[in-house]
Image (cartoon, rainbow, N blue to C red):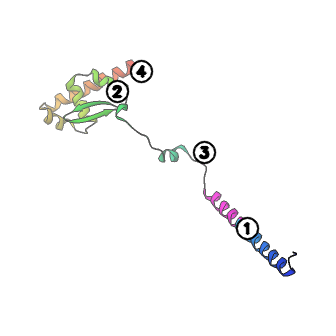
Amino acid sequence: MKPSCFQNTIENQFDYICKRAMEDERKDYQRYISRLSKREVLFSDIGDYLVSQFSAIDSYSTDFHTFTLNGSTIGVENDLLSEALKNLTEKKREIILLYYFMDMNDSEIAEMLKLNRSTVYRHRTNGLAFIKEFMEEHTE
């Protein structure tokens, strides 16, 4: 059975409408991609500073050497520094940890440990000199 002329016309019109819709959709997609490409920047084109803002670094308790001080746990990540702190006397280590990790001043440390402020200062400076010397010896 042969289709009528009317049916052919309807089919041709339907084909034309479908092809036209697909062509319009393709043009819309091309415009969308063009707009995106104008606003997007490749990660390789971004500076390290910006990329580092999007990164996250996990830290685990095994990454730190811990020191317990008055019920607080202080983690030191640097292996050489933690080794130097372990080689200090207990009092000097405690004073340095309180000063640098707990942000206490000499007067507060002296009051807490029941020492003179000058004694705290002397222990702290001697401890720092020892740490400096220790780290210089072990980095060469």
Residue 36 sits inside the magenta stretch? yes
Q: Amino acid at mark 4?
A: Thr
Q: Amino acid at mark 3?
A: Ser
Q: CA distance from mark 3 to mark 2?
A: 36 Å
Q: Mark 1 vs mark 3: which is more N-terminal?
A: 1
Q: Which residues are magenta?
A: 26-43
Q: From what the image shows, is residue 52 above or below residue 120?
A: below
Q: CA distance from mark 2 to mark 1?
A: 67 Å
Which quadrant holds residue 75?
top left
Q: Mark 4 vs mark 2: which is more N-terminal?
A: 2
Which quadrant holds residue 86?
top left
Secondary structure at badge 3 equals helix
Which residue is at 45% across, 43% downward? 56
The residue carrying mark 3 is 44
Q: Mark 4 vs mark 3: which is more N-terminal?
A: 3
The residue carrying mark 4 is 139
Q: Amino acid at mark 2?
A: Leu
Question: In which quadrant is the C terminus drawn?
Answer: top left
Q: Position of residue 89 (x, y in %)?
A: 22, 22
The residue carrying mark 1 is 22
Nearer the observer, 41 or 107: 41
Secondary structure at badge 4 equals helix
Q: Residues within 10 Å of mark 3 (few under 14, many from 20)?
A: few
Q: From what the image shows, is residue 50 above or below residue 65?
A: below
Q: Position of residue 16 (x, y in %)?
A: 79, 73
Q: CA distance from mark 4 to mark 3?
A: 35 Å
Question: In which quadrant is the N terminus drawn?
Answer: bottom right
The label on residue 115 is: none
Q: Residues within 10 Å of mark 4 (few under 14, many from 20)?
A: few
The residue carrying mark 2 is 81
